[in-house]
Amino acid sequence: MRSSQIVSFLKRSASYLVVGFWSIFSVFFVLWIILASLKKTRDLFGSPWSLPDNPVFGNYVKTWISNRFGDYFLNSFIVVNVSVVSILLVSVPAAYVLSRGNFRGQRALSNFIASGMGVPFPLLFVPLFVIMATLRLIDTLTGLTIVYVALSIPFTIYVLEGFFSSLPSELESAAIMDGCTDFEVFRWVMLPLAAPGIATVAILNFIGLWNEYQLSLVLINSPEKRTLSLGIYSLITSMQYSGGDWAGLFAGVTIVMVPTIALFIALSEKMISGITMGGVK
Amino acid sequence: MRRRMIVAFLAPAVGLYTVFLVAPAIQAFYLSLFQTSGFGDQTVWLGLGNYVKLWSDTVFWRSLYNMAIIMFVGGVFIFGLAFVFTMLLNSGMWGKKLFRALIFMPNIIAVVAITTFWSFVFMPRYGLLTSFLKELGLASLATTAWTAPQNVFFSMLVGLVWISTGFFTILILAGADKIPTDMFEAARLEGASNLQIFTQITIPMMWDVIIITLVLWATQAIKMVEFPYAFGGPNIDQNLYTPGIYLYIMGFGQREPVYALGYATAIGVVLFVLTVLAIVAIRILLRRDRVEF
């Protein structure tokens, strides 16, 4: 009996060790970057593991102003927020009709939209570049926003359809009995019920687009229109010539990751359940 | 629901989706048949010429090989680790939600942020890994050039496996959590071992989830651009090329754009075909009768 207890104790300890190590590495990753951004580059190279003796915020000033991360932050903030609002404005009604409506070709249309999730984005690089050039929207934040909205529609509608179809139909019928029009049922009954689901896809889209950079790499060229991810990438490129200002780079990395980490700390359960619902229905 | 409302509710989404996703995807097939720089100058009809050229392009084959390594070698590690974490987290551990959130966390951080960190880890001479190995007294390992052409791909793969493991762990864990717990209790009462429970109950009961996650991973691996591209930095090493990166470089280049837009798009079409083939292959190879419960 006792030896089996020891074995189970060892097993449990090993579990905590493995899972704990992996989890702590995530924390280490974030903390190390933040600490690195508070060091001088010389100290960062000399003693990468130590705490900064006297934290310097100069890296942030330099990155925010001379490296124009202030502008990039604003660009990212505007593009991502306008995109997320637009995504919701077009996707919520469409998902509602696709899951609660009753018309011919409903299923086919639903599948047609979901199939967009299977399109590898690199396939679209050149055609989108050509289309945006024709529309004179290449190298504009408007063009980037339009592409973000269009390419987010399949996933958003797919997840929202799941939320809408899980809502009870009794309230819907009751509202119709009370003389509500179709639109009133949507606006005053179903929309409030779906609010948690809508919030979830809004957050997931916010994070996805905040971190996105392959499409912006293709569509944006002017330095003043860079998003944060492009800003970091261009900082890395320029470091080839100007020598490695790694501490400044990590200040930029901190600026790009703080908003999503803050959201994650507040809403991790919601986000994880949203993703697993979308992936594993 | 009235017809007018159905049309009004669907039109904006379907319109945007059709114009900026479906149409470009179809246009890609057409563009891939030309030699063009996209600026209206000589556009030369090549027929399947771009594909013939791709067939004998060693860089393209190299990128396909890298893609395959990411998919299979990376996949074995990612799914292996995801299953291990699922088993451990479901063995009655305290703090399951906290650990799950921390394991998943890298996925909400910008790819460029993650690759910048990993570049510093693998940096020659001053990198975190080198200084860590020095601390441990492993001087010979510490001098390994992790970003040298022969090693850079696997250094990249370490970081990629790290994030992807978090992503697939939450999916597989969610699949395992859907299995009714009384099945496990019954099996335990019958004296089944952990391994038996895993192979006889967990795996068959979550077969659907396994197929979905494998499809997700295969399609992600095929269209992979961001992680290896950002890890490679400017003048990215060809050892890091995936087909998507090669597409970008042929189309828009690094410092000196190539603008071989037709050729680049042909690569995109190959990616699309590979995606479809992968989905069909996984569904056929792993088809099983659904376990009802």
Image (tube, rainbow, N blue to C red):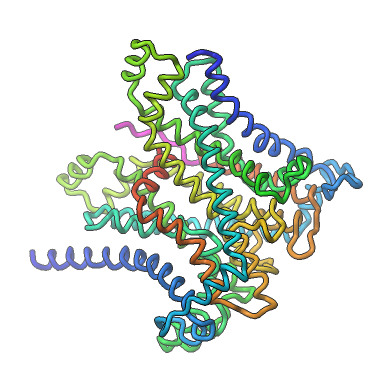
Q: Is residue B285 visible?
A: yes
Query: Is residue A42 shown in magenta?
Result: no
Which image quarter holds the C terminus of chain A?
top left
Relative to B120, is B72 above or below? above
Horizontally, residue B112 falls left or right of residue A20, namely right
The majority secondary structure of the magenta stretch comes to loop
Q: Residue at x 40, y 44 (%)?
A: A276
Quadrant of image for the N terminus of chain A: bottom left
- Can residue B80 be seen in the rendering of this structure? no
Q: Is residue B170 left or right of residue B23?
A: left
Q: Residue furthest left?
A: A1
Magenta-span inclusion, residue B291? yes
User: Which of these two is toward me, B74 or A257?
Assistant: A257
- The residue sitting at 58% across, 48% down in the picture is A79
Residue B133 location, x and y as percent?
Answer: 45, 83
B277 displayed left or right of B142: right
A28 to the left or right of A90: left
Q: Which of A123/B207 is in front?
A: A123
Residue B292 picture quarter: top left
Expressed as whole percent of the image width and height from the top left, the position of residue B40 reads: 87, 44
A107 up-or-down from A129: above or below: above
Rendered position, A50 above or below A169: below
Residue closest to the eye, B13 or A15: B13
Part of the protein shown in magenta: B285-293
Residue A244 in percent (x, y) is at 61, 79
The image quadrant of residue A241 is bottom right
Residue B165 % position (x, y): 43, 57
User: In this figure, what is the number of numbered marks?
Assistant: 0
